[in-house]
Image (cartoon, grey):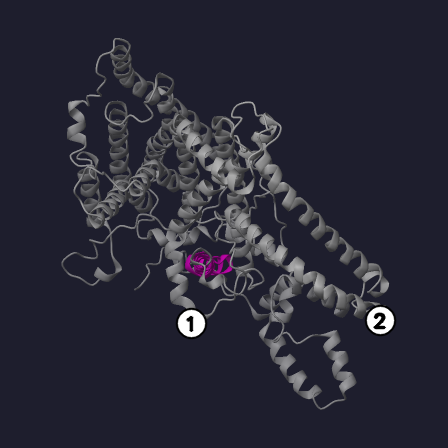
Amino acid sequence: QNIPIINRKFPSILTINLASSRRILSWITLIATILLAISTLIIKWAILKPIHEEIIYKFKNKQPVFFKRHSICRIIDLSSEFNIFTFPLSCFIILLFAIITKSVSFQGSKYCKGYIGIPIPLDFFAHVKRTLAAVIFAIFADELLDIANDVLNGGNPSSNKGVAIIYLLQILRVLVIGFRCYPTLAAVYIDTWFTLLCATIYVWFDFSITIVYNGLCHNDYYPSNDDYNKTNVTDIPRYLCLAYISIKLPILLFKRIRHRHIRDRQLTREQKTLLYSSLPYSVEAQYVKKLFGISNTKISTNRFPQIFQFIYTWRDDFRFSSRVVSVYTSVLLLLYFLTIQFCVQGPPLLGTIRKNSQELANLFSKLINSPDPNLQLNENPSSDFPLPDFVRTYLIAFIAALFITFIQLLIMLAGIRRNLLQAYRGDDCEIPRRISSENINYITGTFHFAGYLIGYVIVGYIFLAIFLFIILISIDAFIIYGSVKTLETILKIIIPTLLLVFFKMYLNKILGQYVFLQRAGEVLSINNRRALMIFLYFNFFLDAFLGFVAAIMRILRSIASEILYMCRLDYSPLGRKLETIDAGFSAYCGFIFVECTHRHPVLLYFVSHLLRDHLYATNKKRLSKARHKWYVAVFLLNNPILIYRRKRFLTHLQQTELKMMLIETKNLNELYIEQPPILAHRASIISVKDLEELWERRKF
């Protein structure tokens, strides 16, 4: 395919004015989003208020309380899987976008002239317009939660549908959700005034339908009068996201209409994104400059990220792809909805759960303790393990689990960046080395990355909340009742064993450092050999007993660490030998390798320069050889690391090594000490310091 050449000089860009205009536009977008979200929440509350007052009136007058849905709800919900308004409209817009989209495979067709192609919803490898894509993905997080609840509850028990039909319908619902947000994403990706106009009309229409549907047809959390205002709490994130999209799309449409005179219509969306990589302020340019030592890594000037600087530090030479930002936004919003659901719907059920748990605790205490008639308790004298009220510990457990999960996600975000930077420079100290024969597994792993991360986070969050709830119940029982015989019996068994294990562990460290090793452990050389042999003989029998305790502790530690790190894909609890059979870790490795292959900043920066030189050809005269050599000399003086990577230097090095093989071993060793072979030396960040020191020694 021939790429058209555009003879146009690339305009100079004023970075200061561009940054200030972007800052002003961001503030305008933020204020307009908040105002629109507040106004729509008020409208939704006004629609819901008459229904609420009617239910309260019937309840106080002891009348039958039945929620009668509005007639428009039957029109909106023709089926539980479809929305009769938005779904056909989204399909029609997708069809329009497919007609105006050019496809490379149809370029030679004489009928469609290159048109009619499936529009791409989002370039997951790019980092352009990530915020808008992330907000669009976050809108449907609550709908995914509804699907998960239906699957866990086994669907509608009153229906006669089979299990396979129920799961197929849930898959169909997921596809319908995808079709609803497809037009908006595709319009932003195509980035023409027509597509943005269609997306703006569609989003405003969908926002209006959402307000009516949530106010009249879809009312959650209604067991009591106190839960009335909680419906608005769950709608705040959704309405903020919808308001942001409703404001952002008209702004993009205005910018596209304003700059319609720029003659870039011959360029594809991929070429425009690739040209962005060679701009002076792009992320790829910052990475290459840092690699050459031209500029230092600058910490972001944004004040908000400095709050979490001890966990994650923003960098100007790295940006996450749209896929990472989108999946993280969806996960965080899904955690918010899940926490609200547990905190609202859970407490009314805790009374029954406490009663059943008390019976199990009594049965467990009878198996451990013999009944003590002298034991007197405050609430339940016949129980050796009284359980306190569950509501307080329940809420604390879920809030603490949410905080821990959020911290783990931030740590994983820093791990993704660290592993990507390591993969860029070929460092495999944390993740396995890439093997060419495993490319199919890598691409299938990156398919599952987003879905596995969402599933692992939700399951890990629930298990962590249950684990914390059990621990807090035990602590609360000690605080309230002062003495719990069952827990005291368990602690009497555990504490002496743990004290013995810790005493033996610190004794071994003291003996190893000051008795059995030379120079207080600075070197691994045995001292007092006779005493060591005697100690190893008696230690053989003692550690046989402690081995059973260590095995039990290993199981308990594995369970605790598995619960704590369940939400992270970059950590495999199976260990280094078995991490490849962990589906989550394999998906993470595949994601890292595919991202490194298609988003390497040096590759994008180099290809972007080639494309820019081809598209925007200039009529400059070729430099003379002497001037070209002077430019090369100045460049190598500024970047001495590259001297040892030049083709002529490597060729000369090979010849020198062949000659030195015939010389004495002493001279050969001196040469290798002075100048190590570059062909066998792996290029990494560690080698930069060595090469700079070598350059300083050899500089004349």
Q: What residue type is labelled 2?
A: Arg
Mark 1 Cα shell of 10 Å, populated few (<14), some (14-19), many (≥20) = few
Residue at the extreme bottom: 662
Work out whether 57 lies above or below 566. above
Work out whether 249 lies above or below 119. above
User: Which residue occupies the foreground of this view, 18 or 288?
Assistant: 288
Q: Which residue is drawn at 21% across and 57% down?
A: 114
Residue at the extreme top: 61
Q: Name the residue under label 1.
A: 437
Secondary element at image label 1: helix
Work out whether 695 lies above or below 656. above
Work out whether 569 lies above or below 204. below
Q: Mark 2 points at which residue?
A: 530
Q: Which residue is drawn at 32% across and 18% down?
A: 45
- Does residue 119 appear left or right of residue 259 in this picture? left
**Could you tell me how far apart the alpha carbons at marks 2 and 1 are, in whole angstroms?**
53 Å
Give residue 626's quadrant in the image: bottom right
- Does residue 525 appear left or right of residue 46 in this picture? right
Residue at the extreme left: 111
For marks 2 and 1, the one nearer the N-term is 1
Query: x and y percent of residue 292 in the render?
Result: 61, 58
Secondary element at image label 2: helix
597 inside magenta stretch: yes
Give residue 428's quadrant in the image: bottom right
Query: x and y percent of residue 545 in the render?
Result: 66, 59
Q: Can residue 286 be seen in this view?
A: no
Q: What stretch is highlighted in magenta?
A: 586-612
Q: Residue at x 52, y 54 (%)?
A: 571
Mark 2 Cα shell of 10 Å, populated few (<14), some (14-19), many (≥20) = few
Query: x and y percent of residue 391 in the render?
Result: 47, 27
